[in-house]
Amino acid sequence: MSASTINDPARRVVLGLQHSVAMFGATVLVPILVGLSPSVALFGAGVATLIFHLLTRGQVPIFLGSSFAFIAPTALVVKEFGPAAAGGGLMAAGLMYLLFSGLVKLLGTDRLLRVFPPVVTGPVIIVIGLGLSSVAVNQAKTNWWLALATLLAAIVASIYGRGLFRMLPILIGVVTGYAVSLLTGQVSREGLDAIFTCAWA
């Protein structure tokens, strides 16, 4: 990402909008999949993000959301022992994060990369994604052509886009999917009209 893109307020707003779409979907989807409250997940993610920015003095533009790495064990614990036990497990995982972050701070990132090089972390991320592919298929099979149109728009933007458009595949995919749904009558115009007619003050 070029310096001009970062310093341009209009581009920052657009990039922030894409990040909001991506993080909201992920943060809400994970608790729904495991059987926990999305509201609690959003609140916890918001508080954690504010604490992170306070500690890093706003130097890292990041949002701390739900982790897809914990979907399988959390869903199993919720099913077998209930949400309270899952919450305790997640707090224990958070303490482990604090422990390892302290070790990284103490020992440095070079030693961490020796234990967890990209050749190790990359396949782990791929396995997590493949494990979630069944969820995407189950959601897409209710309307295959709409799902494919949305995916195609994101792929085209990512591969053939130029400049800012190449950095907005998620936002372009969402906008394209909604526009197609709106034009084909799959979503009601009432919600869209309410945005323009509601009182903003």
Image: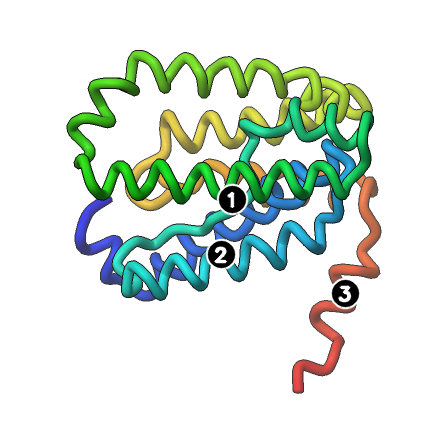
Residue 116, compared with residue 146, is above or below; it is above
1 and 2 marks in contact (CB < 8 Å): no
Identify the residue position indicated by label 3 in the image: 193
Picture coordinates of residue 46 (x, y %)?
54, 59
Residue farthest to the bottom, as pictured: 201
| The N terminus, quarter of image | top left
Q: Which one is nearer the viewer's eye here, 117 or 151?
A: 117
Q: For mark 2, what is the residue?
A: 48
Q: Measure the alpha-carbon separation of dots 1 and 2.
A: 25 Å
Q: Secondary structure at mark 2?
A: helix
Q: Which mark is residue 171?
A: 1
Q: Residue at x 65, y 24 (%)?
A: 73
Kindly identify the amino acid type of the residue bearing the numbered disc 2.
Ala
Q: Secondary structure at mark 3?
A: helix
Q: Position of residue 101 (x, y in %)?
A: 33, 41
| Residue type (three-letter) at the residue carrying disc 1 | Leu
Would you call the spot at circle 1 few (<14 residues within 10 Å), some (14-19), or many (20 or more)? Answer: many
Could you give the CA–CA distance between mark 2 and mark 3, rounded to whole angstroms? Answer: 35 Å
**Label whose residue precedes the other's in the sequence (1 or 3):** 1
Along the polypeptide, which appears first: circle 1 or circle 2? 2
Q: Is residue 92 left or right of residue 14?
A: right
Q: Name above or below for residue 151 compared with residue 200.
A: above
Colour pattern of the rendering: rainbow
* Comparing labels 1 and 3, the label whose residue is closer to the camera: 1
Q: For residue 191, which quarter of the picture?
A: bottom right
Q: Choose the circle earlier in sequence order: 2 or 3.
A: 2
Residue 127: where, in percent of width, then height? 51, 13
Q: Quadrant of residue 185?
A: top right
* Residue 171 x, y percent position in the rendering: 51, 44
Residue located 69% across and 54% down the image: 40
Going 61% across and 15% down the picture, which residue do you hit?
131
